[in-house]
């Protein structure tokens, strides 16, 4: 493997770990802690909320530090910091302690998106497919959180779900540093200097177009983030409620004996969530290819329609039908992820790209954090059926916003010069 391919692979693994760490607690709360600590699921969600706010709010300073100091250096900080934070969280003996641990995990997790995506969109061409490939790894991290944590709950306890990925991340941080130490040294020796573009002044019409697109990007980013968080965080609990019959049958089926023994329902539910996440993540590869070919407007509208249909179909379903429809709306939820990053990568100037991604992810992850109280409120009052109808309405709002995008995006002059 060439150094360039290893570099891209480590960036992708970083995205995998970033989402895995942020969702370990979702499965731990759904399948273990509510029994061990005697707290309701809605109560436990509250302790995850500060971590998701940190996930968003610290994206902007992370992007700023990366532009001013070193993007590769910040990636080393990400790998090592989030790994150590996860291992420390495993020592928690109360909800408050685990909430503090999740907050620190969120601070380090905030580094990845503004920094890693800035590297991906600046270093390599064929932006749509690169972002999509990177996104697949992130979504596999989402799915693996349920799979790995469910397995460890049955075979080693929930604490190991924080310890094992943490140790792996610290080791990978060392490998990343060895691969990129010369680039980090050069970045540190020659910090980025702000320069003004020599391009001609922007016309009023062009500025107005950029403002309209930016408003759509940030609006759809917020709504898409609520959909993504509501589905990925709540899916293990929803499967725990609606797939019990299917899960119990699978624990006695021969095909599952290599992974789950009789009674290992948590492992099966985690595995089903992983399968849904893994298959749905492939939608990003299709979307990435379509973005390079057709542009974001048409692709985004198709993805929004998929979500509207499948969210509306979900209420009342259980077992096999619930599993199939969940796969449908997760295809839409995952498929939408690379679209806004693609638009930012095409329009944002290179020197400030990490900071612009930082702003995008402040919006995105603040919406992620805000969606946790929404999940708790709707679930506690009306259950998941109402939540699915709310999410279908959110997808309608995305469709309306996206219909106002131009058919072709304006491209920043700085992109061509990178």
Image (cartoon, rainbow, N blue to C red):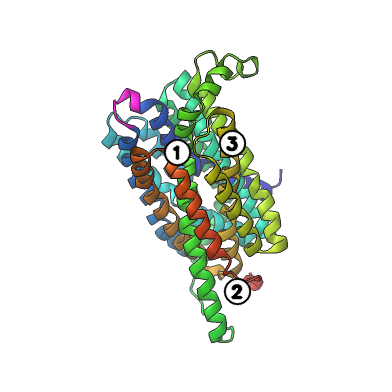
Q: Label 3 belongs to which residue?
A: 276
Seen from the viewer's position, the closer of residues 52 and 199 is: 52
* Residue occupying image coordinates x 56% and y 30%: 272
CA gap between label 2 and label 3 equals 37 Å
> Image quadrant for the N terminus?
top right
- Mark 2 and mark 3 in contact? Answer it, CB < 8 Å: no
- The verdict on residue 230 being magenta is no
Give residue 58's position: percent from left, percent from top: 39, 55
Q: Label 2 belongs to which residue?
A: 412
CA gap between label 1 and label 2 equals 38 Å
Seen from the viewer's position, the closer of residues 70 and 399 is: 399
Give residue 196's position: percent from left, percent from top: 51, 80
Give residue 91's position: percent from left, percent from top: 33, 29
Q: Earlier in the sequence, mark 1 or mark 2?
A: 1
Q: Secondary structure at mark 2?
A: loop
Can residue 124 be seen in this snapshot?
no
Check the image and report above or below for 359 versus 3: below
Check the image and report above or below for 297 versus 271: below
Question: What label does residue 344 carry, if any?
Answer: none
Q: Earlier in the sequence, mark 2 or mark 3?
A: 3
Q: Which of the 4 quarters of the picture holds residue 32? A: top left
Can residue 315 be seen in this snapshot?
yes
Q: Residues within 10 Å of mark 2 (few under 14, many from 20)?
A: some
Region in magenta: 34-40
Q: Label 1 belongs to which residue?
A: 234
* Residue occupying image coordinates x 44% and y 23%: 153
* Residue occupying image coordinates x 56% and y 71%: 349
Of marks 2 and 3, the one in the foreground: 3
Q: Which of the 4 quarters of the picture holds residue 160? A: top left
Give residue 346's position: percent from left, percent from top: 61, 67
Q: Secondary structure at mark 1?
A: helix
Q: Secondary structure at mark 3?
A: helix
């Amino acid at each position: 493997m060439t150094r360039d391919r290893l570099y891209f692979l480590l960036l992708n693994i970083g995205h995998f770990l970033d989402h895995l760490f942020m969702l370990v607690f979702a499965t731990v709360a759904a399948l273990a802690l509510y029994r061990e600590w005697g707290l309701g699921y809605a109560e436990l969600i509250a302790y995850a909320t500060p971590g998701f706010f940190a996930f968003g709010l610290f994206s902007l300073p992370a992007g700023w530090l990366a532009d001013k100091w070193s993007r590769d250096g910040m990636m080393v900080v990400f790998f090592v910091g989030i790994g150590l934070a996860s291992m420390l969280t495993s020592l928690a003996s109360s909800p408050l302690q685990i909430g503090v641990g999740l907050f620190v995990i969120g601070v380090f997790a905030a580094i990845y998106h503004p920094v890693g995506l800035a590297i991906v969109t600046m270093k390599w061409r064929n932006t749509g497919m690169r972002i999509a490939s990177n996104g697949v790894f992130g979504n596999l991290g989402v799915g693996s959180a349920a799979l790995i944590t469910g397995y460890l709950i049955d075979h080693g306890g929930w604490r190991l779900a924080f310890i094992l990925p943490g140790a792996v991340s610290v080791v990978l941080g060392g490998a990343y540093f060895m691969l990129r130490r010369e680039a980090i040294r050069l970045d540190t020796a020659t910090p980025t200097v702000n320069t003004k573009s020599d391009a001609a002044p922007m016309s009023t019409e062009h500025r107005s177009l950029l403002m309209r697109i930016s408003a759509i990007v940030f609006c759809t980013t917020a709504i898409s983030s609520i959909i993504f968080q509501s589905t990925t965080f709540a899916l293990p609990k929803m499967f725990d409620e609606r797939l019990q019959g299917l899960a119990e049958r699978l624990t006695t089926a021969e095909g599952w004996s290599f992974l789950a023994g009789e009674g290992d329902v948590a492992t099966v539910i985690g595995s089903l969530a992983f399968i849904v996440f893994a298959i749905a993540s492939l939608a990003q590869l299709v979307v990435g290819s379509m973005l390079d070919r057709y542009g974001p407007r048409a692709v985004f509208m198709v993805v929004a329609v998929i979500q509207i249909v499948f969210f509306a179909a979900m209420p009342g379903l259980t077992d096999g039908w619930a599993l199939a429809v969940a796969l449908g709306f997760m295809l839409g939820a995952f498929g939408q992820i690379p679209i806004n990053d693609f638009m930012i990568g095409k329009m944002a100037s290179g020197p400030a790209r990490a900071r612009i991604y930082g702003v995008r992810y402040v919006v995105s992850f603040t919406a992620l954090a805000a969606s946790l109280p929404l999940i708790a409120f709707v679930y506690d009052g009306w259950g998941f059926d109402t939540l699915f109808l709310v999410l279908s309405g959110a997808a309608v709002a995305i469709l309306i916003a996206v219909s106002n995008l131009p058919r072709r995006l304006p491209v920043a002059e700085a992109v061509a010069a990178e």
